[in-house]
Amino acid sequence: MDKHAPGGGRFGSRGCPRCCCCQWRPGREFRNSCPSDNRQSLPNNDRPRHPDAQFTHNATVADALAVTLHRPIVVTGTDTGVGKTVFTALLTHHLRQQADNVKVMKPFCSGERSDVEILKCAAASHAGLSDINPFFFEKPLAPLVAARNISTKITLKDCLERILEFVQGEGETLIEGAGGLLSPLGESFDLLDLVRELKSQVILVAPNRVGVINQVLLNIRELARAEVNDVCVILMGVKDPDVSAASNAVVIRELSGKSKVFELPWLGEEPVARPSLKKSYGRCEKVLAAIVPHP
């Protein structure tokens, strides 16, 4: 697909009012070159790459993922506890309506593995918890900090190798992150490094409440700096919505350019537990089909 054509990925693309190949906004500097403007562009990416970033060029992770039906989808959030696991479970259930070979991972988890068990159930997976979640820590800390507390080092290469082991073969692959986009996962890498190495699509989950506009736009800007433009925003309904909930999606659509923004309703306290998953899915099916249409 022409990079200047709208909709460069499954979730669409974002860009300036004249084209969709740059991250231009009124009053902001250029990050990529814009063919409709003759000003010189700034460097494409001023975020340093992790030293392990060449790993997939010399090994087989990218090749292994290339044989899947689609690029992997990475689900991240504006914070911890914003609904990443709820959404990932719902999307997994949605994809399984058309195919049985849906793989879901949460590479990093700390505190407890209840989220991992939810994902395993949603995927009807026979994989072990340690395969779905290869890096688990008992203390509820950022993975880098938790690993250091037990004198363990995890590199980006370690993480990529475990993903490769799990996703071999055809099918959709969903990967849920831990914390937020820049939460430190291991030695000198975060989820954004993983996204770039996997060339994945990104779904950004956020609570539909006051303050979310700033949180979402900051994440989108950081993704754009890393040249990740295939981003979809999910606003999760909250139990007691404030007055901003009626306008947050509209404003984010306006200010984020081409990013697609969807809203899900409040689904209750345990919406994706085994007895509740199908009921919750029924309330969200149309929205999920708009986010990732059935093939």
Image: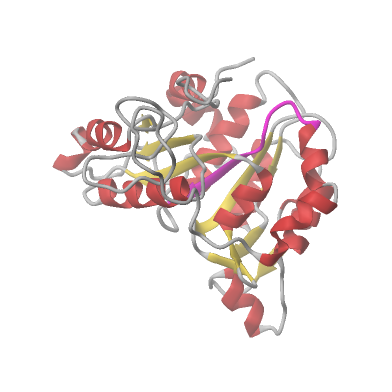
Q: Nearer the viewer, residue 284 or 22?
A: 22
Q: Quadrant of residue 253?
A: top left
Taking the image as shown, residue 23 lies to the left or right of residue 183, namely left
**Residue 10 at least partly seen:** yes
Look at the image and give the residue range highlighted in magenta. 67-77
* Colouring convention used in this rendered image of the protein: secondary structure
Q: Nearer the viewer, residue 6 or 162?
A: 6
Q: Nearer the viewer, residue 81 or 251?
A: 251
Taking the image as shown, residue 4 lies to the left or right of residue 49, namely left
Instruction: Please tell me how many numbered marks the rendered image carries.
Output: 0
Q: Which residue sits furthest left?
A: 243
Q: Residue at x 49, y 27 (%)?
A: 11
221 in relation to 292, above or below: below
Q: Residue at x 19, y 33 (%)?
A: 246
Q: Residue at x 29, y 27 (%)?
A: 17
Q: Which of the image's four quarters has the C terminus? A: top right
Residue 71 highlighted magenta (yes or no)? yes
Q: Quadrant of residue 13?
A: top left
168 in relation to 133, above or below: above
Q: Residue at x 28, y 37 (%)?
A: 252
Taking the image as shown, residue 170 lies to the left or right of residue 141, namely right
Instruction: Give the percent coordinates (x, y) of residue 223.
Output: 46, 48
Instruction: Give the percent coordinates (x, y) of residue 270.
Output: 47, 45
Q: Quadrant of residue 191?
A: bottom right
Residue 150 highlighted magenta (yes or no)? no
Instruction: Give the percent coordinates (x, y) of residue 49.
Output: 60, 61
Q: Which of the image's four quarters has the N terminus? A: top right
Q: Nearer the viewer, residue 33 or 285?
A: 33
Instruction: Give the percent coordinates (x, y) of residue 212.
Output: 28, 48
**Residue 272 at least partly seen:** no
